[in-house]
Amino acid sequence: MELIKDNVVPWQEGSAKSITFIVTKDCQLACKYCYLVGKNAGERMPFEVAQQAVDYILGNPQLFPEKSVVFDFIGGEPFLEVDLIDRVCDYIKVQLFEKSHRWFNSYRFNFSTNGVGYHEEAVQRYIEKNRSHLSIGITIDGTPAKHNLNRVYKSGKGSYDDVARNIPLWIKQFPQGGTKVTISSPDLPYVCESVLHLYALGIREVNINCVFEDVWRDGDDQLFEAQLVLLADEIIGKGYYRGYACSFFSEIIGKPLDPELQNQNWCGAGMMLAVDAAGVFYPCTRFAQYSLRSKKAVAIGSVREGVNRNRLRPFLTLDRSTQSPQECMVCEVAAGCAWCQGENYDAAETSTIYRRSTAICKMHKARVRANNYYWNKLYRKLELEGETNNFEKKEAHVIC
Amino acid sequence: MKKLVGKVTVEEKDEILALFERRNGLSELAKIVTAENDALYEKLVSDIGVTSTKFQRWWDDMSSKYQWEKEDSKKWEIDFDTCEIFLL
Amino acid sequence: MLQHLVIMLDDTAASYCHYESRKTQRRLISLDSLKSGILFAMKQNLMLQVVYPRYEIPDGHKAAIESIDHCKVAQGNGCVRGVAVIIFDGWRDAESRLAVAEAAESKEKIVVLRTGKADFFAGHASAMQLLSRAERLNVALTDVDTFGEKDFAAYREALAALGEAVKQLYAQGLRPQLNILTDRLQLEKANSCNAGYENVTLAPNGKFYVCPAFYLEDESDAVGDLSAGLDVKNRYLYGISHAPLCRTCDAYQCRRCVWLNRKTTGEVNTPSREQCVVAHLERNASRNLLRSLQSAGLYSAENAIDEVSYLDPFDALTGR
């Protein structure tokens, strides 16, 4: 058994093309932190649009040279359209095979679901049919209190009970499945207990992040740090580090970044391709109109015209230094500080993706402090228990 | 209880991974292709045969090359992340 | 650092660059705005470039403009005196009216030839005449964004022919300046337009714009006005240091048009493939010209332009 469980790396990360079908803009829930400002029940993807998208993508393999592919189905809630998805997946499989496309040997269908309808017969039938090519994550935010704070039905009722009842079935089917937790300002007091609650439910991989939007209030960073220190104590004290992972704690974050050698963009927008119900292509779903508060959608083509490669150029040439303010370039804890290109665009003063939003800065710094605490405490424990002696020790400078 | 009995190269791992993925793909495709679609059905049946043969040949070639430990009642398994071969 | 202020005197003022000036309704800048703009330029220590309409402006406006050192930009129709930059639309326009313009002026001229690809490919043979009579010829292609593979091939051929013409003039002891061929012979860094960064435009409505093209495209796209001052949001994006494709590119003659960039890619700092390939065809033609001039002993052997394996720096940057 591994000594410390690593955060799981996504399937074929870096070598897989991500193709996203926005199958519906409807959802049973009305989560308070949801960035999808334009959700509605009207825009459902017709099969013919999905078919045209598949035909274009598979018919132009030179434009999509990646060796693997992940077909993402998102909403709203994607499983509201499980019949459509089933038909689209069948079409994809047949087309990949008929065309002897290289992706037939390396594809996945990926879902992030709210979990409310996971048990339903149509969903289960679909899962059974495509089991070996599926990756499904159910979003559950933690304790009932934390979950129901944000993840509510349109009526205002919390959705925890309806999601939690499906967790055992999901874990049985996808033992490696991870959940995605989003933290906003009101959630901060619940961070520690929520992660522990998810572990108790049997979820071994908790991917958690603070929202990128400018929602943070004075004192939130201290509260966040305190919660993470509590969580660190619990994970170490109860030995969760052996079999469970929480993406908040990572050895690679919180270090300075070389302005030239570590100049890559963080976000993958532009490497992906999203298509909506009208057949319009986007560099990521975050650039579709329903995701944007204050800016116009950024389309990069359509199923009829294909990909406009000029529109992709800014995304594919974007790097860290070009979009970051100077404070970020000289930041001593820059590693692991994330950004969302869509949020950057939405928050920028002009219509540009070359303007990094720094709303998350103080939360990242709080995370780094707690992360340092976690690793110092964990390695000392392992060292005292004789389990490791090969971690990087600090130089023992004596100041006197 | 599984026992580590050897390791293959990354290239060798990639070869069996592709065959493994293809076999899974063919298996799931078989659930939706019917004999009514003659051409596709025949292509599928033929591919299943070819892929199975290649799959078995990989294990035969590798076990012969590396001389892995074996037992009649047990089978080998590969960890695609580490390229390690286990007997279980 | 801001260095130039362009004042567009009227909505119908001539285009001197890639954009089209399609407005037909006259809208002259108010005298107050003109004077305020001139005052702004004086206080900011900016060089003034005044773009004229096709008609004669009122005396008050003339007097205000003459109160400061400036550069006049106008169509070659002879109705403005002392023009430094004469604009022609197409080869035929240039051929037929250069003499008229010359007759009206005494100074040597910078000629801007605005031309579409069809006109350029068909008429470039008459470049010799223009090159020998103008101090400098600036070709502004008005439809770069529509270039396809066949156009690239035709452009390559046209540049080669122009290179021969330039070489002949060199052999006659002349030193013709043709932006798309001879600039790169001498440049050691990018010669970008730098609109939004080193220059801005005061439009007839009294507001500032990145350049006239931004005004003509969308009046609401202002970057300040005469009362509140200049306010270019995300100004750093107009500088070459924040243009990933351009900052390491050595097609130094490229004007890096931020308006075309935004039009084609959505970002002011990112050029389209068409712009990059056209710029590299020019760069490579300059390289051929340089080598040809050097081998004929007509140019210093110290200058060199390296060979590169790509026409689009995007391919080199992204490894595609």
Image (cartoon, helix red, strand yellow):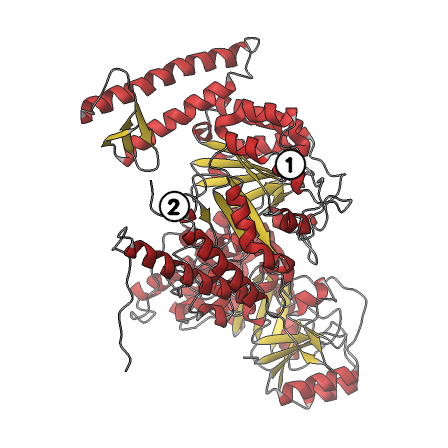
Q: Residues within 10 Å of mark 2 (few under 14, many from 20)?
A: some
Which quarter of the figure is the N terminus of chain A placed in? top left
> In this view of the protein, which residue sits in the foreground, A238 or A395?
A238
Distance between the alpha carbons at the discs numbered 2 and 1 = 33 Å
User: Do the residues bearing badges 2 and 1 touch, measured as CB atoms within 8 Å?
Assistant: no
Left or right of B55? Residue B44 is right
Looking at the rendering, which quadrant does residue B51 occupy?
A: top left
Left or right of B2? Residue C265 is right
- For the point 63% across and 69% down, the residue is C87
Residue topped by disc 1: A78
Left or right of C283? Residue A279 is right
Q: Reading the chain from its start, which is encountered first: label 2 or label 1?
A: 1
Position of A19 relative to C228 (above/below) = above
Q: In the rendering, at what x and y percent does residue A322 appear? A: 49, 64
The label on residue A392 is none
Residue topped by disc 2: A242
Left or right of A385? Residue A176 is right
Please count the marks in the image: 2
> In this view of the protein, which residue sits in the foreground, A114 or A241?
A241
Q: Residues within 10 Å of mark 1 (few under 14, many from 20)?
A: many
> In this view of the protein, which residue sits in the foreground, A378 or C273?
A378
Identify the secondary structure beneath mark 1: helix
Identify the secondary structure beneath mark 2: helix
Residue C311 visible in the shown view: no
> In this view of the protein, which residue sits in the foreground, C161 or B37?
B37
**Mark 2 or 1, which is nearer the eye?**
2
Q: Amino acid at mark 1?
A: Pro
Q: Chain of mark 1?
A: A
